[in-house]
Every structure is written in C-alpha cells, then in structure tokens.
C-alpha cells in the first residue's frame, strides 16, 4: 500500500474522481447543515453523545460483561476476538458449522477492517455484499471510498457497465438493455440480490450500537438489505468492535437523533432494526456476536487518542475535509477514510508502516472535522498527538503491552511523514482552504465561515480552532531555521 | 489465556488512568437536550407526523369518519391491483372486511417461507408507535403487525396508525414506550438509496410503496 501522499497524488490527478467527490461532499454537507439546524438542542445532544461514550469507554470492561450476559440470556452466543485473524477464524468456523458455502452481508466497516470477505473466500465461502454501493464495489473488484456512499467514485455509466459485465458471474445477470438511469440500476440490483436473500441461510452484519443493559443490537440503514440479512437467514453472525456498546436502551435516544442527521442529513434513516438475542419463529434461530478488539484496546490506552473510539461512523467529517475532498477515500489505505481514518487507522494498526505513519499528516488541521463531529471528537488534537508519536516516539500500547515507541528517525516512516507534509504544501489551494477556515474562525467570535463552510456555520456554534495551524506546525517542526529542504530523515529540530 | 480474558486484561490495563473507585455514574452525562422539540397540540402533532411521512415519500391517508377505514384499505389494495395480502394474526377483523374475497389472504404463519412472501402483493399491519418529529412508524412484531419478514418482502405495505394513542412527538418518547426485548423495526418512508450519483431512488429491497393511514378514534377501533 503506498503512503498517503503517493496515493493522494494519483487520485488528485483523476478529475472524474475529484468531480464526483466534490459534488458528493458539498451536497451532503449542505443537506446536513439543514437537518442539524432543525434541532435547537444540537450542541446538548452532541455533548450528551460524547459523555455517554466517555462513560462507556472508561468502564468498558463492566459494560462488555453486562452486554455478554444480556445477549446470552436472550439466546445469543458471544465470541471474543483479539485480532483480525481470530475474528476471521471464528466467523469462518461458524459458517462452516452451518454447512453453507454462501453468506449474505450487510455493509459493515468492521468486517472490511478485518478483511473478512477474503478470509471467507480462502475457506471456499462466498460472501455477497448486499448494500447497493457495496455491491457496485464488489462487482467492480474495487474498494469503498466513502463511509456512507462507498461507490461515490463511480458514475452511472460505469455502474451500468459493471452490472452488465459482472452480475452474471455472481448470480442473476443484469436485465437485457440495462440503461444507466439510477432507477433501472437499482431495479437490476433488487432482482439480482433478491435471489440471494430468499435463499440465504447465513447472514453477516456489523452493528451501529449494542446496548449493555438489554443485549440489544441496532443496525441503521436505508435500503432494506440490512433488514433482509437480519431477518431471513437462519443464522446471523454480527462482528462488532468492542467500542460500539452503549449503557442503556434510553441512550439510543441520543444516538438515533445524532446519527441520521449527521450522516445522511435525514430526520431519520428509512430503516432501523433492533434485535435482542433470538425471537421464536421471527428472524434467525441462531445468533452469534463476535466482539472485536483488533487494536481498539491500544487506542483505549491512549488518553488523548481514546476519544476516537466514540466515533459512530456518520461520515460527516469526510464531507467537510478539504484533504479528503481532493485525495479521495482510497488514499487512506484502510476501511476508514477521511479525518476519522487519519486518526483511527494509525491507532488501530500502529504507526510502523509508511502508510500508517503518513496518515496523521493527511490533514490541514483546519478543524472543520471537529466542528461537525456529532460526538465531538477533537480530531485535530489527536492528529497533532500522533504526529508527535511518529516523529518523537514515546509511550504507546501495542497489542495490549505498554511500550516506548522509538522515534521514526531516519526511518521510512518519517520520510513518509515529511513527504505528506510537503505534499500538502505543494497543493496550495488545499492548504488555503484549511487555513482560511481556521484564521477566520479565530478572528471573529461569534463567527461565520466563508464559502462552503457558510452553510454549516450559519446554523452552528463554531469550533475552538486548533491552537496550531498547519503552517505553524510546519514552521515549528522544521525549526523555522531555514532548513526548508533536505530534511528527509532528519529529526524534529525543536 | 483465552481471548475473552486477554481482551478484558487489555482493557483494564488500558484504563489505568481511571480511578479504581470510579463508578460509571460518576462520569457525568447531562441530559439537558429536549425531550420534545417545540410545543404542539395533539392535532398539530398528527399533522406534523403526516408532513414528515410525506416528506419521506410515504403516501399518507386519513380515515377520520367512523368505519371509513375498511373502505380505504379496500380501495388502496384495489388501486394497487393487489391479488393477495399478508395478514398478521392479530389484525382487527374489520380492517379487511371490505376487501373482496378475490384478494387472497395469506396468514402470517411459521410455515410461510420468504419465497411464499415474495409472491404476495401487499401487507396490512398496525404499528406500535409513530414519531411525529421524524416521520417514523415503529413495528414491534405484536400480533397486529406479525413477524418482521411480512413487512419486508412484499412490495407494498399499508400501515395503520391509531392517532388516539399511538402517536408521540419525539424519539425519546418513543423509546420509552418500546420493549427492547421485542424485535423492533423503525420505518421512515419506503426503502431508499442515494448510492448512484446521490440520486434518491425509492426501493431497493424493502417495500417500495409505503402507505400510512392515520386512523381516527372511531375508524380504527381498539384491537
Ligand atoms: S469522527 Fe465524528 S464526524 Fe467523523 S465519522 Fe466519526 S462520528 Fe462522524
């Protein structure tokens, strides 16, 4: 996987991708502002959301134990996976035990994170993605590029071609003479997938929330493919990160208000399904919950980075990020793109690889991501913290053990970091966007944002701007001593 | 060490900054957000529900007059050309009394397979609660709603809301009424996707047509 700057450099040259992304992010951003503005208690909901998650994280062991007992009492079975390999092994064995060779999947970032589809394929099991965008991605042998609209990098003509060429290899072929009208494409997907749903014996899902008190799992979606996967199969396997737990059923009142408005800019998403263990003759007869660590406990151990585990994957931060808008989701090299990816991936995976070390630099630190985040994750703060870790090393938890990471001195990681920083400086328009937001917001209080930020600042309180702008950081870390070039492999000089 | 013990141990090590004596309740959560947004009469709440449902492209009908509900349901099924209708076991008998016998009743039973349901035109159900602020109906698989699958596979769903006692203003009010142990399905408008160039298209998998009937006191009866 190339480091962020190379990948981003390639994607910023792809004008189709940039146009699609720009259209998507700006459209969703404007709609979101309107949906949020409908609630005059948004800032309080946001504070409550953050606080509930903090409460959960500080007592995660307790809540997970409570969740486990509740799920078990309701007829489910709980499995624990320390890492991706273990999770994949558990799921593979569970599917094997059913005797099935095919499973239907509802979009899940956790299973994408652990590469479940690949692991199942190795074991001779075919996993069908059933979210329309994920289907497009899967048929196109491609990777998702956005959390909410994973196939946003594809336009209708491409989708038509993918359907026409590939559907027959996976099941029911695309109808003859398929046009590129979205309604026709959706109909083709409906017919193709319905065949799979009606015959499916095993479903695999993630979950948006798990309620410790009751053992209830929640999936929030639009298309109904989630309902299909959760309802029709005989066996349901849900792979969920340990951080997705919330204490009480009542707490959902906060998240079911924050999530849809932040994500799809709707008052409520078309479908939300909850299930508590198994129910007689209604839905799957067997339910397995696989609780996934895979770096989450290392993230939890970092008192600055811990807040990243509050994330409810709404994707609002992607849509306001000037770097994401130009670089696209693939440049981030993981299931988690955009600002959340830039802080979550290097925490889940560590900063050893060149890619992961470069991610904390994939930002202009403009602060827009923090401003929109419905659970108030201070993404810029974590970015600066992780940059320090890359450049200076320091204490960190690696697979559960506290260690001191060495500075990435003279190492590929630092080179990647420096290159990422220079990449941003070489894209002055991008940097300006970030800085303009930051400087304006700093000067006027209460304030409004210019240009594209206008829509959301009009209706919102504006953020605390990060103390340090990108350029200040650059000055500081490069010593401001005129060593503007040739610093590759050099350690930070202040 | 098994993985459960391993992950638990990691969590406890990760949380060394949390005082051993701290209880979850000591981490403050201020619930100063509104329970309801705005101040409305009951009638206005029902109007808001109707507006928000329609905004999400559900088709909204009213059955206020006494006994107008059976006639309305019969008309909606006829307009749709429905030849069969899935029927939850506890649906009030009067609701389908005007539907001609030529429309096959398909009772929701354990034997009903997904393939059977795929051949059914429509489904008629009640609901557990409806949320005005978001335009949402919530099903909880009670006898007048049937199992989750009957409102999922047929392409046309008619859902009756009793305005006297099933409409609430907000999400917090709805959660309070619901039993988490039951399987819940929250429905806000028909199935939709915006995955293709952000064009909203109704219906990929769930029913593509959602018709909601706001039934007044006399017409709905109490099941
Ligand atoms: S970091 Fe915040 S804004 Fe970004 S996806 Fe997560 S919850 Fe949403």
Image: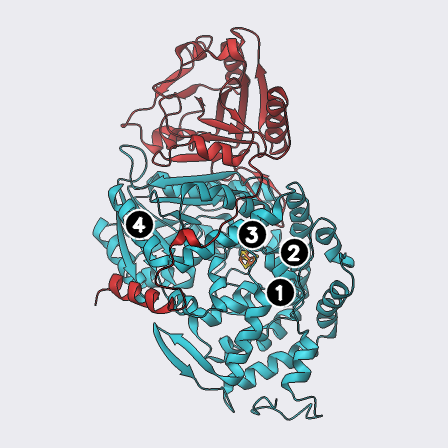
Where residue A19 sits in the image (x, y, percent)?
Answer: 69, 60
User: Residue A278 vs residue A422: left or right?
Assistant: left
Residue A362: x and y in percent read 60, 72
> Which mark sits nearer the N-terminus, 3 or 1?
3
Name the secondary structure under disc 2.
helix
- Cα gap from disc 1 to disc 2, whole angstroms: 9 Å
Q: Which residue is mark 4?
A: A66
Give me the chain letter of mark 3.
A
The cyan chain is: A
Q: Which residue is mark 1?
A: A324
Name the residue that disc number 2 marks: A25
**Viewer-side label of 4, 2:** 4
- Residue A351 vertical placement versus A293 (above, below): below
Return the residue nearer the eye: B38 or B43: B38
Task: Judge the density around disc 2: few (<14), some (14-19), many (≥20) Cα neighbours within 10 Å.
Answer: many
Q: Badge 4, how many Cα within 10 Å: few under 14, some, many 20+?
A: some
Q: Earlier in the sequence, mark 2 or mark 3?
A: 2
Say whether disc 4 or disc 1 marks the residue closer to the N-terminus.
Answer: 4
Looking at the image, residue A249 sits to the left or right of residue A270; the answer is: left
Residue B76 vs residue A91: left or right?
right
Q: Colour of chain B?
A: red
Q: Quadrant of residue A117?
A: bottom left
């Amino acid at each position: 996987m190339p480091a962020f700057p190379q990948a981003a450099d390639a994607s910023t040259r792809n004008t189709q991708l940039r146009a699609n992304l720009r259209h998507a992010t700006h459209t969703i951003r404007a709609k979101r502002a309107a949906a949020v503005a409908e609630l005059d208690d948004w800032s309080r909901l946001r504070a409550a959301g953050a606080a509930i998650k903090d409460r959960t994280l500080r007592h995660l062991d307790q809540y997970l134990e409570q969740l486990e007992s509740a799920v078990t009492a309701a007829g489910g079975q709980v499995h624990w996976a320390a890492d991706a390999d273990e999770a994949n092994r558990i799921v593979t064995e569970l599917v094997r035990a059913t005797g099935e060779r095919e499973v239907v999947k509802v979009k899940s970032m956790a299973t994408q994170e652990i590469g479940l589809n690949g692991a199942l394929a190795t074991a001779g099991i075919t996993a069908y993605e059933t979210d329309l965008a994920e289907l497009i991605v899967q048929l196109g042998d491609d990777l998702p590029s956005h959390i909410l609209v994973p196939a946003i990098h594809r336009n209708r003509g491409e989708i038509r071609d993918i359907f026409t060429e590939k559907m027959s290899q996976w099941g029911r072929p695309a109808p003859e003479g398929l046009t590129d009208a979205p309604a026709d494409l959706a109909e083709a997907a409906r017919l193709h997938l319905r065949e799979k749903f009606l015959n499916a014996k095993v479903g695999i899902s993630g979950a948006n929330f798990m309620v410790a008190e009751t053992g209830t799992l929640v999936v929030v979606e639009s298309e109904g493919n989630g309902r299909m996967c959760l309802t029709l199969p005989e066996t349901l396997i849900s792979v969920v990160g340990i951080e997705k737990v919330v204490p009480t059923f009542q707490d959902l009142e906060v998240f079911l208000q924050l999530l849809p408005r932040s994500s799809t800019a709707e008052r409520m998403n078309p479908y939300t399904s909850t299930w508590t263990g198994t129910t007689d003759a209604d839905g799957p007869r067997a339910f397995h919950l696989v609780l996934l660590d895979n770096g989450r406990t290392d993230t939890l151990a970092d008192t600055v980075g811990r807040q990243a585990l509050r994330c409810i994957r709404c994707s609002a931060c992607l849509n306001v990020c000037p770097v994401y808008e130009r670089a696209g989701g693939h440049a981030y090299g993981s299931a988690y793109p955009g600002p959340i990816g830039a802080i979550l991936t290097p925490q889940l995976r560590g900063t050893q690889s060149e890619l992961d070390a470069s991610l904390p630099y994939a930002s202009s630190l403009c602060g827009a991501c923090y401003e929109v985040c419905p659970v108030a994750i201070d993404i810029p703060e974590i970015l600066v913290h992780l940059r320090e870790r890359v450049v200076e090393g320091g204490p960190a938890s690696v697979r559960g053990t506290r260690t001191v990471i060495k500075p990435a001195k003279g190492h590929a990681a630092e080179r990647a970091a420096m290159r990422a920083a220079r990449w941003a400086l070489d894209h002055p328009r991008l940097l300006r966007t970030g800085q303009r937001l930051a400087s304006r917001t700093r000067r006027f209080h209460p304030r409004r944002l210019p240009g594209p930020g206008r829509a959301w600042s009009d209706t919102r309180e504006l953020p605390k701007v990060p103390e340090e702008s990108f350029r200040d950081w650059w000055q500081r870390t490069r010593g401001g001593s005129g060593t503007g070039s040739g610093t590759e492999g050099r350690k930070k000089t202040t | 060490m098994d993985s459960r013990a391993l992950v638990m141990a990691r969590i406890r090590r990760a949380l060394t900054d949390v005082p051993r004596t701290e209880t979850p309740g000591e981490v403050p959560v201020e619930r100063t957000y509104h329970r309801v947004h705005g101040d409305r009469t009951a009638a206005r709440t029902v109007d808001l529900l109707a507006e928000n449902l329609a905004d999400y492209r559900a088709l909204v009908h009213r059955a206020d007059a006494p006994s107008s509900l059976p006639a309305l349901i019969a008309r909606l099924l006829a307009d749709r050309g429905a030849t069969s209708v899935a029927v939850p076991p506890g649906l009030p008998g009067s609701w389908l009394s005007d539907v001609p016998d030529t429309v096959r009743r398909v009772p929701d039973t354990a034997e009903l397979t997904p393939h059977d349901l795929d051949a059914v035109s429509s489904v008629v159900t009640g609901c557990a609660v409806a949320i005005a602020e978001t335009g949402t109906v919530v099903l909880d698989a009670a006898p007048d709603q049937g199992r989750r699958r009957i409102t999922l596979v047929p392409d046309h769903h008619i859902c009756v809301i009793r305005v006297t006692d099933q409409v609430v203003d907000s999400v917090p009010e709805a959660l309070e009424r619901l039993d988490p142990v039951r399987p819940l399905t929250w429905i806000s408008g028909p199935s939709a996707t915006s995955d293709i160039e952000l064009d909203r298209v109704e219906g990929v998998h769930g029913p593509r047509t959602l018709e909601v009937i706001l039934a007044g006191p006399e017409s709905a009866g109490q099941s």
